Amino acid sequence: MTTRVLVVGADATGMSAASRALRRAGRNELTVTAFERGHHVSYSACGIPYWVAGDVSGPDALIARSAADHRANGIDLRLRTEITEIDLDTRTATAASLDGGASYQVGFDELVLATGAVPVRPGLPGVDAPGVYGVQTLDDGAAVLNGLTDSPRRAVVVGGGYIGVEMAEAMIRRGLAVTVVDQAAEPMPTLDPDVGALVRKAMHGMGIEVLTNTLVTGFDTGPGGRVSAVVTRDGTLPAEVVVLGLGVRPNTELARAVGLPLGEYGGLLTDLQMRVPGHDGVWAGGDCVEVLHRVSHRRMHIALGTHANKHGQVIGTNLAGGYATFPGVVGTAVSKVCDLEVGRTGLREAEARAAGFEPVAVTVQSTTRAGYFPGAVPVTVKMIAERGTGRLLGAQLVGQQGSGKRVDICAVALWNEMTVEEMTSLDLGYAPPFSPVWDPVLVAARKAAAAV
Amino acid sequence: MTTRVLVVGADATGMSAASRALRRAGRNELTVTAFERGHHVSYSACGIPYWVAGDVSGPDALIARSAADHRANGIDLRLRTEITEIDLDTRTATAASLDGGASYQVGFDELVLATGAVPVRPGLPGVDAPGVYGVQTLDDGAAVLNGLTDSPRRAVVVGGGYIGVEMAEAMIRRGLAVTVVDQAAEPMPTLDPDVGALVRKAMHGMGIEVLTNTLVTGFDTGPGGRVSAVVTRDGTLPAEVVVLGLGVRPNTELARAVGLPLGEYGGLLTDLQMRVPGHDGVWAGGDCVEVLHRVSHRRMHIALGTHANKHGQVIGTNLAGGYATFPGVVGTAVSKVCDLEVGRTGLREAEARAAGFEPVAVTVQSTTRAGYFPGAVPVTVKMIAERGTGRLLGAQLVGQQGSGKRVDICAVALWNEMTVEEMTSLDLGYAPPFSPVWDPVLVAARKAAAAV
């Protein structure tokens, strides 16, 4: 008998799981029906800021695989259709088309919940006014671009996280005057404040105004009800374009209704195989789950396409009778604002303390290439290690080209629980166009090893 | 009583050891006398090709610290002076100025041998003709540049290793027609031949002629005795400039005369602390020693400034009564030829077999950034793992900007003896300007994990 797999949410996790399961088990073993509320599947949401900036020609470029591709691979894909109820006892779900039509029942043996995340939208006056944009779906991207056709002059980005700073870059490259507003003391709250301060300073240098410690209280509207300003506790910022970059939260209403276990951040909990514990045949992955942080040993919500794709592979392998696990994350992220690259991995100082570590932090300045080589630019590396043991706990890098992806060295070191002393011996690629004779990461490790 | 440290060879290892020991122990505890045959100390030999290419303005840029800097730090530095004999029983050495003057004796308690490497010079007819250049010292660099002032048209580079291809780039950027000649089947013998073939193809695309499987038998000379051609078994290649890039061998004549232990490649043998075993108070490091390869468990000769600097730090710490070790290498190297970047680490297939492993190799094509992002360029990743266990044994990457330094991910994974299966879960930095959602290294690891 074939196993009926029901996939809820047809983006990275859902479609990776479905494709891998079918490829591995074959269509005689498995049937897959996938439901998606949106118009699109398998697109790169992380690419939207670059589409808005003009780096990417259009939304088609962001679609990794089309609905037709997936159908050709044997997946029964139903777009613009929502799963409104799930009965785990009878193994049936209720589907409803968002474009009208009667609801209907779908039976399943295995369930994959890949419902993603929803952007945080503050319940503030005026937040729904035209001209206030989110940045999650391709429709959002199209709406922002459409809003730029009237040649607006001023944009305010609410939220200084990754999406916020990436959208700030997009707006300034589109010729708008840009202000980023954030409640926190510094932009990029996944960095320590001292490193965030470097990002703020660099953004100022790019002509991006950054207002930190600033609470947004609402949005003024003008003629036609369009947004005209962002109101903060410290004053009013006129803007014809407002972008909300306040992060996302797990989309787990359906899971909650079914009674599945949720964590501290509202994300689904899973075991190592991405199975929902206590619920055989129920799998979850991607932006709707919490993941284990291998350094703090805590669960976190980190919405990143790279994790979502891995979850999909793991679920697909297991669905097809194989064995795969997702052993957690070390909190690696990389981003850029114009020509400034930012990489981070592991724990910030405050996170390290909250997890029970006593952190020792050092910061060094180095260059991305041999100092005498053309294109060598300064890079700042902050490294955090455990007092006494010297175990690496985290690292943050800020600099121009060649800075951000160096975080991978620290990410692999963290994964393997290396000490900073051990790291000083690492055999990294050296040649003048690529690195000083001591890679900046090694310079930081040496200083950290002497400090712990 | 102060400890008298004698340093033979005042480049990366010797001067790092001396500086660190003095900084740590203080001048009351230690005196350091350093002897150097050349005119310069602490310079970046790896930067010479880029100086010849015009990337670097002049030799001064390549000097990390001048003789005056070192003297100001308390090192008694004697340039153009050779140590001709060492008596380990009486703890005395004989020094001779290369610019004339009587020999003299120097007493010591601790000896640091940092005599570096000497370029391989084939004993072929005409090899000493004007117009045939080595690439090791700053004087060599100046000589090549001087040879270019006559507007020569044709250069032949003998040897297709790192220095050879880097000098080929320098010559073509200086406007010369360039041919690289090598005995091997492909350039860059530290790569597997299939990967070397990609480099050869790319070099052809840059207009660099690459003649492989070609044995050089001598050098023709013309008017004034200057070189006029490189003679090979397959024909004669006219050239007004000939660059020898045939690699280096450890400079250990003195060590041999003293009776110190040498390895298979003629390099000094040391223990983990960089002490010469059986000879208390004798230390060695840099290009004159052999290093332990952590994957093959064999000793190798790898002349690289990054190892030499680490050796110096280790020796300096130990000299000053501290404790430090050099735990070996994994064979990481990175280089470029014009816009082609090459990274390698670990063992080649043949090396893996020679060490007793049964290797499984896979090769994948990916891109350096998200495929839709501007500047995304193809990168080829070859990954080698042990059959059965799936342990990573080596990796090689070839592609344009953003390819070479990705080797560090594999270098850290190798250091920690990760399996390719474990690597598939690595939490690497992802954002469209930096990587596809699956980093090329992860794509290779997935394919390797399925193949072992």
Image: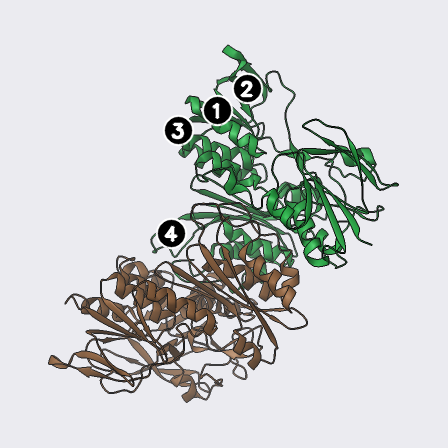
Chain colours: A brown, B green
Residue bearing mark 3: B175
Same-chain check, marks 4 and 1: yes
Query: Number of labelled discs?
Result: 4
For mark 1, give the secondary structure. Answer: helix
Crowd band around label 1 with a 10 angstrom C-alpha radius: few (<14), some (14–19), many (20+): some
Which of marks 2 and 3 precedes in the sequence? 2
Chain of residue at mark 4: B
Residue bearing mark 4: B376
Q: Is residue B320 above or below residue A11?
A: above
Q: Residue at x 55, y 62 (%)?
A: A410
Q: Which mark is residue B354?
A: none
Residue bearing mark 1: B147
Query: At label 4, which amino acid type do we have?
Result: Ala
Q: CA distance from mark 1 to mark 2?
A: 9 Å
**Left or right position of A281 against A102:** right
Query: At label 3, which amino acid type do we have?
Result: Gly
Q: Marks 4 and 2: CB-CB under 8 Å?
A: no
Q: Is residue B98 above or below residue A346?
A: above
Residue B115 in percent (x, y) is at: 70, 38
Residue bearing mark 2: B130
Viewer-closest of B193 and B287 = B287
Chain of residue at mark 2: B
Which of marks 3 and 4 precedes in the sequence? 3
Query: At label 2, which amino acid type do we have?
Result: Pro
Q: Nearer the viewer, mark 4 or mark 1?
A: 1
Viewer-closest of B425 and B48 = B48
Q: Nearer the viewer, mark 1 or mark 3?
A: 1
Q: CA distance from mark 4 to mark 3?
A: 29 Å
Q: CA distance from mark 3 to mark 2?
A: 20 Å
**Left or right position of B337 against A450:** left
